[in-house]
Image (cartoon, rainbow, N blue to C red):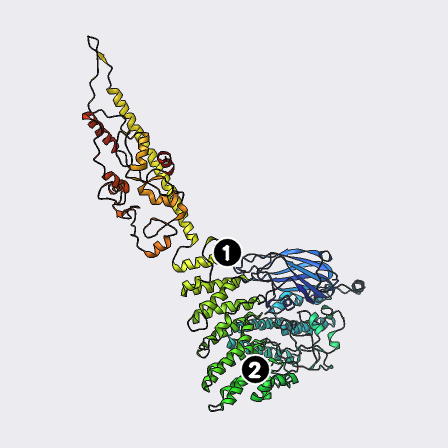
Amino acid sequence: MPHKIGFVVVSSSGHEDGFSARELMIHAPTVSGWRSPRFCQFPQEIVLQMVERCRIRKLQLLAHQYMIASKIEFYISESLPEYFAPYQAERFRRLGYVSLCDNEKTGCKARELKSVYVDAVGQFLKLIFHENHVNKYNIYNQVALVAINIIGDPADFGDKNNITSREKLIDHYLGHNPEDPALEGTYAGRSDYISPLDDLAFDMYQDPEVAQIIRRLDERKREAVQKERYDHAKKLKQAIADLQKVGERLGRYEVEKRCAVEKEDYDLAKEKKQQMARYRAQVYEQLELHGLLQGEPETRRPFALPLQPLAHPGSPRHQKPVPSPPQPEEAVPENLPADPFLQEKLSSHTLETLPRCFAADPSPPAAGPLPRNPVETLPYDERPLPASRKPQEDTSGEPEISQADSRGAQRGGGTVEPEPLTEKALREASSAIDALGETLVAGAYSKTWSCREDALLALSKRLMELPIGTPKEDLKNTLRASVFLIRRAMKDIVISVFQASLKLLKMIITQYIPKHKLSKVETTHCVERTLPALLTRTGDSSARLRVMASNFIQEMALFKEVRCLQIIPPSLVQPLRANTSVHLAMSQVDLLARLLRDLGTENSGFTVDNVMKFAVSALEHRVYEVREMAVRVILDMYQEHQALTLEYLPPDDSSTRRNLLYKTIFEGFAKIDGRPTDAEIRAQKRAATEEAEKQKKEEIKVLQGQLAALKEIQAEVQEKESAAVMPAIQDPQGRRVAPPAAPDAPDDHYLDNLCIFCGERSESFTEEGLDLHYWKHCLMLTRCGHCRQVVEISSLTEHLLTECDKREEFGKCHRCSEAVPKEELPRHIKAKECNPAKSEKLANRCPLCHENFTPGEEAWKAHLMSPAGCTMNLRKTHILHKGPVPAQGKGPTAARSCSSVAKIGSKIPTPKGGLSKSSRRTHTQR
């Protein structure tokens, strides 16, 4: 019958800290599973080795809720030539792949359980994870697998299949029905039947200890059916159904307790633990009452079941119970050491009574004593479930009876005695022993984590109870011995011991030293001796330890007793070495940024020089996050010391801005100063250019309309003139008489000899004369001093910014709206001496005299041509020195002509903004 196959993880392509592939060997409600590294390269790969050569019937995968691979491929192999050798693709045979849902319908709040039915023989299974589904929660593009379950049969059956067929034939002749409802659900019913207890969903929702009991009861139920003890089988079936609900409830309590521990809500965690203990004891009492915990008539307490953590020793995150206990007549030694080979090879599942699932040796596990795994390195709340051998009535009070170490010491029950100190420890801690006593130091050196924590708590209590007036020498010796033990505890891998060391150090600095009025030398000794160990822990692989160490260093630096010593800031500005770990470098820069905001650079140990040198060197670090934090430090420094900060950076030019980091820094400076960044300037230029192009098109359209109107007027005048001309009449003497002149006939050449900009008329205004007039004398025009192009004065600013050949050298002042050379623009803006410009609807702005005057087109003529107008129009000054302009033409005809032209000219509006760039170049460039 197919059943669960045990496996170990041979290798993986990588994992995130705390989420190793070995976590897949654990099946429990609180399991976290495997996660790929952040921003990893795909595909990712995991290789599993089953405990024996098997025929795999079914694979089950439990995907993460949002770190979901788009596709997972399966490969199988019979054997590998070398352990951890590079695996050759041809040695694995591809079975196929499964695609996983992107989980968008559930909002990434549910996990997908994928079951795959296969038929393949081998011992090594390889999983290849392809690129992840993208969603807003998976910000690091990771893939993850919470659990994997393998169900199959041992491949080496020999003639067992023939035996099975022969048994079926005998049953047929004897009249036995293999589909008997009484046999349904047992291995005798169908040869390919898979028990629900082997399903992955069972382990992921059940309390591990209850799951072990359920499997044992299910085995006894099948035995009762074979022996036709149907009443007993019925009772066992009902007990299994009830226990499944109990296990799910206990599993839910365990998850809630774990969440409370992660949130550091220890009151809630303690409440959940007590709730679990009471509920478990009540259920076990009922089972014992009905005699369901064993096959014999006499009962045995459920707490006598030996348990061990499920996880491999290298992964102390989760625990699970061990296999079924030995027979009652066998004695189980309590202090049996764990077998490392079994610990490496055992699956993450509970060992069942079918031993072939978990070991190559087909002998039952009850044939010998069970291995047990010491768990003193595990946090207290992550210990195996209770396994007390005391009577239940002695467990009153705190139901916290757990295995504390390999000797079966109980933390909640009796006192834990630390082991004697070794000769090396005696030599190393001789001064601490003299000051504190050998018992306390032995506890701090103990291999049991609870002893180490208790030693620190006892030391803290002892220091608090020291009376005022104790000799200074004794106080100093006690303090230095305490610091010695604190340094050792800071290197402990158990979080509770590390926390106890931090609390003890804080008490010494803030209470012990001030209470006994010890000198600053003792405070300096405490900080200098413990700071290196603390800084080292900021680079720990555990994120929780890193955060705790960093927060304590920041808190300690703000102690009034430590702040005045200025010890911590200089340690944080030491240059990062090339071999510094990523976590350590990130923590150091982050601490520097936080303390810089808290302490500043005035009498704090931080100076502009040491901070900027460290930050600039950190810009060259290989890790992007470190470089990003260094940029943040530089921007913080610039807010306080702008001029000094710039001295440590390269000049702000185009070559420097090619470096993305320096570009970010200088743009940050611009935002701090309130200046527009390069991107904003480019956007403004682009908008100005688009606006100028739009205006040009409008001007061209207006001019074209004006020219069309002029042509129509000219055609009308020509028609009237031709109609008024009469043919010559001859008198009787044959002389030709001219026809009478039409009164007030308009001149058809009224636009000749006329400047359309200033309205001046002169006989010298031929085509060449007009060019000369535009080039030198027209009061409405001027020559650009940079490209020598003639432009209207009203559009000179726009020309310099958008049309001039040297337009890249000019920028616009946002105060006066005029074009200013970029070299002078910073000084111009900073001086704020320019006359502010008004809106175009309120006033025109003269680019020559920089004055605001009445809006409108006619106002430009009055300002630029009248004596009281613009004082900086050099052409007007030249004209004023000349005499008055004589009247054009002679006699009444000339006067009429001028009057006619004036009438026609009054219909021609002065074009807004002048001619377009193309028209201006055609008619005005010489």
Q: Residue at x 60, y 88 (%)?
A: 438
Q: Report whether 607 appears left or right of 304.
A: left
Picture coordinates of residue 274, whole percent (x, y): 55, 79
Neighbour tally class for label 1: few under 14, some 14-19, many 20 plus, Cα within 10 Å: few
Q: Who is closer to the viewer here, 356 or 190?
A: 356
- Identify which amino acid the numbered label 1 is placed on: Asn
Q: Who is closer to the viewer here, 296 or 880?
A: 880
What's the mark number on residue 659? 1
The tag earlier along the polypeptide, 2 or 1, is 2
Picture coordinates of residue 882, whole percent (x, y): 23, 37
Q: Are marks 2 and 1 in contact (CB under 8 Å)?
A: no
Q: Check disc 2 and report its element: helix, strand or loop.
A: helix
Q: Residue at x 43, y 70 (%)?
A: 601
Q: Is residue 399 visible?
A: no
Q: Quadrant of residue 433?
A: bottom right
Q: Report whether 809 appears left or right of 592.
A: left
Picture coordinates of residue 263, whole percent (x, y): 51, 72
Q: Is residue 486 visible?
A: yes
Q: Report whether 690 appears left or right of 199.
A: left
How far is disc 2 from disc 1 in space, using C-alphas? 49 Å
Q: Which residue is mark 2?
A: 485
Q: Residue at x 66, y 56 (%)?
A: 97
Q: Check disc 1 and report its element: helix, strand or loop.
A: loop
Q: Who is closer to the viewer here, 650 or 678?
A: 650
Relative to 37, residue 330 above or below: below
Q: Quadrant of residue 897?
A: top left
- Identify which amino acid the numbered label 2 is placed on: Leu
Q: Nearer the viewer, mark 2 or mark 1?
A: 1
